[in-house]
Amino acid sequence: MASEKAAAEKLDELYEFDREPVSSDRLLGFGYFLGSFAGEHVAATEFVIGAMFVSWGATVQDIFIGLALGNLLAVLTWTLLCAPVAVDTRLTLYWYLRRIGGPVMTLIYNLINAALFCVLAGCMITVSASAVRIPFGIPAQVDWYPSDWRFVLVVLLVGAVVVALATLGFKSVATFSAVCSPWMFLMFIAGAVVMLPVLAQAAGTDSFLDMCARVVWTGKTPDGSPPMGFWKVSAFAWICNLAMHGGLSDMALFRYARKPSYGLASIAGMFLGHYLAWICAGLMGAGAAILIGAPLATLDPGGVAYRALGWAGVVAVIAAGWTTSNPTLYRAGLALQSITPNWSRAKVTIAAGIVTTAIACFPFVFTRLLDFVGLYGLLLCPAGAIVIAEHWVFPRIGYTQYWAARRGMRLNLPALFSWAAAVGLALVLETTGTLHLFYLFVPVYLSTMLLYIALAGLAGAREPAAAFINEDVARGAAPVVPSPSKPLPKASGALALLALVACLALPILVAAGGVDGYEERLASMKTWLLAATLVYFAGGIVFYKNRAS
């Protein structure tokens, strides 16, 4: 019993303002958010989504222009909606929504939210496991159910590591991502570069754009179904993280930001991650399929990366899965902790991690990823619309903020009805073929906000009420000036930088040699790339550890 009590006390030391505003001495600099976004969005899902665009018949214009437009809209949503509310309140969405919607609505939201987060994190664990399986000779798992019991054991191992890292909290998650993200980004580029000779030979042209149009983004689907098209590609890029930006779930991260402008850190995720990584993953996947003479759909992310980059590719997929599942599971823990206030966030995260790992044993979580991502954002974004209405619109039209809580209501019925009605509208629009799933965000968001304003006004939001919270607390503590940084470990940083240069130079040398001798150069590169990877992590871990100490 004594050991259990000591362990519980250690976990409780990881408390991270789960129920109150973040204090000014715990605010973090812009670099932490860059690292977190780059690590989370240069991730395991990029291997899956990049390949999906190839299979869904996207064209070159769809990819290079459509993705740029959609990712720009996502950055603006984080910067103009999510980050300002987070900095104003210094609260997680879950506890701020409790003040607006009452404990019953928050319970409903958090149960749905946590369940969806667990599925998403489970997808990342499955993708990591698709790489870990390779040295054990386990076949690729691309069906709904696992076909090899050894794959289940691999998932359990990967899940245990992910849960341990997520339990350590936001700063540990961000630091882990900061170490991995520069190298992971180069792995995506390296995988695309080494496949260029294979793709050029198959396309019969040295023109990059012509090659892409002929053998990668051809505008044709394998089964002859209609291709995605420009606007669907753009819309997907915008809504891919809808629950995080438009749905305000990333308030959990930005409550640590010193300024609302830190929302621009999402550029690292959207353009280094989604934009470039999706393009590189498409090139890598198409090239790997040509090399083995099999359809791309028969390859899992681990198989694609291994054929392009060898064991360094395996490590890349594992790390990509971890850096995405860690913050996702961290958010799931925050959601569940708000409905289990007697448990610490760390304990709840462990419980959520067990459920997540069980889900990850079933590969369907990544084979249906794109549809899940669209549905996931659509179900949760109405909560963000309700918060935006109450936080910004109500004071400007003379409504009373937190009117339901001031009345002692356990359930804000106008908020719940607005949410349900908007989701119902989306269901009608999608099932009748009026709008595609990827286009439903705007009508759902606007209808939720307008309906809530109207119903809240009828229910009593127009009436003045006494303040029920400390307004200074609601706004959050004032930012503080950061303390001077300590000297950086120059030697380890320089070593890590040289290793990154090698990770980029090696695949370029392979591609520059053309088709003649390609196989020999590729095999040699895989050996040296793994060595450069090990050197990078040795130097990078020392560098970041000393900088943080």
Image: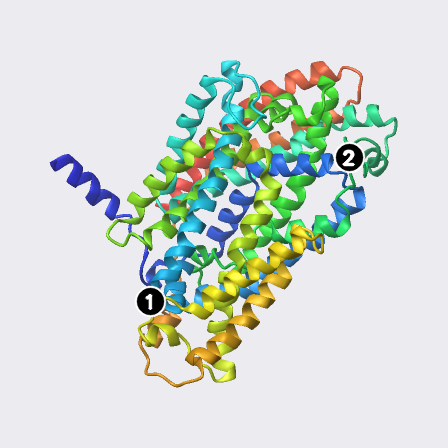
Q: Which label's residue is closer to the chain start, 1 or 2?
A: 2
**What residue is at 49 percent from the left and 52 percent from the top?**
33
The disc labelled 1 sits on which kind of residue? Arg
Spot occupied by residue 276 in the image (x, y as percentages of width and height): 67, 42
Crowd band around label 1 with a 10 angstrom C-alpha radius: few (<14), some (14–19), many (20+): some
Horizontal arrangement in the rendering, residue 388 relative to residue 5 (left or right) = right
Which mark is in front, 1 or 2? 1
Q: Quadrant of residue 480?
A: bottom left
Residue at disc 1, secondary structure: loop
**What residue is at 64 percent from the left and 49 percent from the top?**
271
In the rendered image, which residue does mark 2 sit on? Answer: 221
**What residue is at 48 percent from the left and 40 percent from the top?**
119
Q: CA distance from mark 1 to mark 2?
A: 51 Å
Q: How many marks?
A: 2
The answer to whether residue 333 is seen in the rendering is yes
The answer to whether residue 355 is above or below residue 149 is below
Colouring style:
rainbow
The disc labelled 2 sits on which kind of residue? Thr
Residue at disc 2, secondary structure: loop
**What residue is at 76 percent from the left and 28 percent from the top?**
196
